Amino acid sequence: MAEMAPADYVVLGLDIIKYSQKILRDQKLAQEKVDRCFNEAVKEKRPEPDAPLPHWVDAGDGGYALFKWAELDVLETLKEFYKRLNRENVNYTEEQHKVLVRSAMHKDQVVVWDTEISSRPVKKFTGHAINNCARLMAGMIKEHDSQVVCSRPVLDAIMVMDENASPTRLKDIKDKHGLEHEVWNLQIGGLLGVKPIKRELHRVPTERVYPGPAR
């Protein structure tokens, strides 16, 4: 089976809030709504007609989109996704029927390769980019709806290209290996994200302010 060389991907993780608390029918409806809004956003914000479409790693209650696009293009896609999702949620007055999604962005290398499972060809995805994006989402608190977080590599690129971005550093995420991962809450006006609360902020106040691109 063919194997591609490692390449940089922006990994966008999407997680449907309170997915496991929904009945089976509503879980499927939530998946369909997220799929529809995401696909429409990708079509709308694709930077070039021949730009590679993102790979999708499904997780049931969301998943991971792997983009070979610039960080700003992925960010614009995420804005469009939330705009469309919010538009659909307005049609429901009962909170349990709304579909709320938290998201995280990270950038690192991924190997995309072909294999077979049950004698059928499938694509597999290997790399710390996916694992670390999952860690960012796992560390998000439950109080927020529609929170957006990102890692420092993604944030550095966004801050160069989007002057309206407002980041705040959150507590580092410590993984099972004892490694700490820098996490930033991302807000862009009323278009994206939420204001963090005190208990999730980095313990050192001076560290909460974006210092400029990492050197």
Image (tube, rainbow, N blue to C red):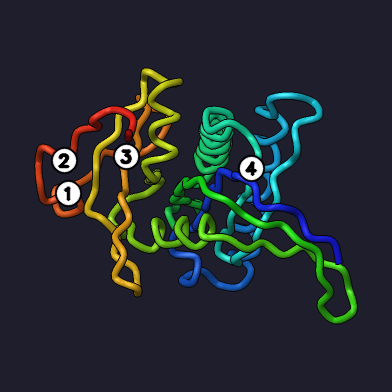
Q: Secondary structure at mark 2?
A: helix
Which comes sooner in the sequence, label 2 or label 1?
A: 1
Mark 1 is surrounded, within 10 Å at the Cα level, by few (under 14), some (14 to 19) or many (20 or more) other residues, namely: some
Q: Amino acid at mark 4?
A: Phe
Which comes sooner in the sequence, label 3 or label 1?
A: 3
Which comes sooner in the sequence, label 3 or label 2?
A: 3
Q: Circles 3 and 2: CB distance less than 8 Å?
A: no
Q: Amino acid at mark 2?
A: Glu
Q: Amino acid at mark 1?
A: His
Q: Amino acid at mark 3?
A: Val
Spot occupied by residue 89 in the image (x, y as percentages of width and height) = 52, 43
Please tell me the numbered disc located at residue 202: 1
Residue at the spot x=36%, y=26% of the render?
165
Residue at the spot x=58%, y=55% of the render?
64
Residue at the spot x=67%, y=50% of the render?
35
Spot occupied by residue 125 in the image (x, y as percentages of width and height) = 67, 61
Mark 2 is surrounded, within 10 Å at the Cα level, by few (under 14), some (14 to 19) or many (20 or more) other residues, namely: some
Please tell me the numbered disc located at residue 67: 4
Please tell me the numbered disc located at residue 207: 2
For the residues marked 1 and 4, what is the alpha-carbon distance in whole angstroms?
A: 29 Å
Q: Circles 2 and 1: CB distance less than 8 Å?
A: yes
For the residues marked 4 and 3, what is the alpha-carbon distance in whole angstroms?
A: 24 Å
Please tell me the numbered disc located at residue 121: none
Please tell me the numbered disc located at residue 194: 3
Q: Secondary structure at mark 1?
A: loop
